[in-house]
Image (cartoon, coloured by chain):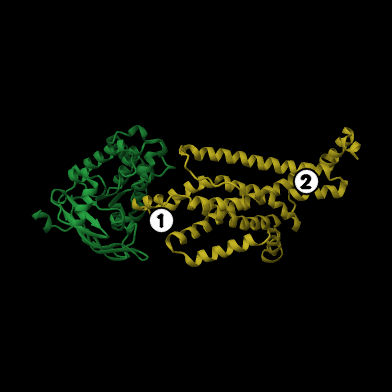
Amino acid sequence: MQEKSTKEPLIKTVGLKKSFGELCVLDGVSVDIFEGEKVVVIGPSGSGKSTFLRCLNRLETPTDGAIYFEGNELTPTTDLEEYRKKMGMVFQHFNLFPHLTVLKNITLAAVEARLHEKKKKKLKISKRQIKAEEKARAMKLLTRIGLQDKADAYPSTLSGGQKQRIAIVRALAVGPKVMLFDEPTSALDPEMVGEVLSLMKELADEGMTMIVVTHEMRFAREVATRVLFMDAGKIVADGPPESIFGAPKDERLKSFLAKVL
Amino acid sequence: MMLTLLNAKTLAERFRSAFIVDERWLLYLNGLKNTLIIALLAVVIGILLGFLIAAVVYTKKKTGKLKILSFVCNIYVTIIRGTPVVLQLFIMYFIVLATMKNGILVGGITFGLNSAAYVSEIARAGLESIDEGQMEAGRSLGLSYSKTMLKIILPQALRNIIPALFNEFITLVKETSVAGYVGILELGKVPGLIQSRTFDYLFPLLIASVMYLVVVYLLTLVEKVIEKILAKSDRSAGNVKITGGRKKCKKKAQKSLS
């Protein structure tokens, strides 16, 4: 812990606010997230967890406040496309591209990114070679999750658990430094939750920095290095899982835990 | 009258004079050719311009950008859909493109500009039928807005609107017969020409009708093939397909939104 505080945070937010019209969803969220941390965000629905996550990769534009990534503040001139490549996002409803095969789902963004880079830097690599390399990488990722035989299948033929694992791999294929998970198991049948969580656990063990919004308290306990409890758009409690679950101090946290545990 | 109509010998004679005498079949073929050229030109313009308009209006709705352009597009669609295509043709033929010698080209452009307004509404309905999560997923992977539109949203929207789109094309093929009003020799004008010589409408009308029918039927075959190709990824039943005519499709699109 001592060592961490001397390092620069990977993500830093200062007074992050987001309102939709009159409704204030985020009410000043300031938090430092360091490399390698596995942060689990918990809280009642409507507390702003998802909005916080979506503000981080700018799917929502914050109304006020600042976000720093690797020490650089996000400004209106920041190249959001480049920024988002460093932040993988996994959605509750998978959002796989139904008109593309599993393999294409995974390679699309990575191939586009490299074609973009090739154009910008005038690299001498052929489009075909890029595609072949990305395909090989995608196959490796698919093999890792045991779905290599689904490479040419379309998403509609897969189970929910398979879809979400592929969505995770799709986000990984772009080479992110942080992975954001927005209730990744909430839309799954109970028997499929396990396979998704165990893949996430694997990622965590490999050292990936993760921010996970979830209702899976067991996952939070086992995997998280830090738990944020949000309520009414604010971070109410912030600490290691032992203290959040073991010795909750805040009244709202206590009543929330009493309901979900 | 009934007797002459059913008399096989006279019928054969009447067909002969309607189709074979003086190589009149060439007239039909020429008319058909011109109809197809006008329709093809119109379909191409209609698709390109229609999808462009749809993309602008959709982008304005989703991101708030392109306000002025979207306003212009809305006015365009309103005017085109609010006036008869015959008058649009007259305006183009006698005023706007009066210097253009090629009537077929004028016809193609006019019907293309007309069709674009209808295609744009169909395409907009298609774009709006795609779940917002698709755009978010694309953007979250670092794809730009336009790349996401092109690679993710548009292909899915296209699949959903194929029936409505072909409905528009079918209407368009038959609508080109309006071009006869300004003296363009298209298939719909041929029966009148032949009748003016043979004083017999029966077979000229039948023959021209059958030709339209065949063209439209071929179009529906093309539609089936395209649907089959696009459906290979489609095993889910939950996809919104927008079918029906110009009036119906808008209603259905609204339904799919709510």
Instruction: Give coordinates of residue B7: x percent, y percent.
Output: 89, 34
In-image side of B151 versus B14 (left or right): left
**In the rendered structure, the residue with mark 1 lies on which chain?**
B
Q: Colour of chain B?
A: yellow
Give the residue at mark 2: B27
Question: Residue A44 or B94: which is nearer the viewer?
Answer: A44
**B68 vs A132: above or below:** below
Give the residue at mark 1: B145
Which mark, by number, is residue B41?
none
Q: Colour of chain A?
A: green
How packed mark 1 is, by other alpha carbons closer than 10 Å (few <14, some 14-19, many 20 or more), is some
Tell me which residue sits at (36%, 48%) in the image: A109
Amino acid identity at mark 1? Tyr
Of discs 1 and 2, which sits in the foreground?
Answer: 1
Question: Residue A246 or A175: which is nearer the viewer?
Answer: A246
Q: Quadrant of residue B227?
A: top right
Residue A260 seen by the camera: yes
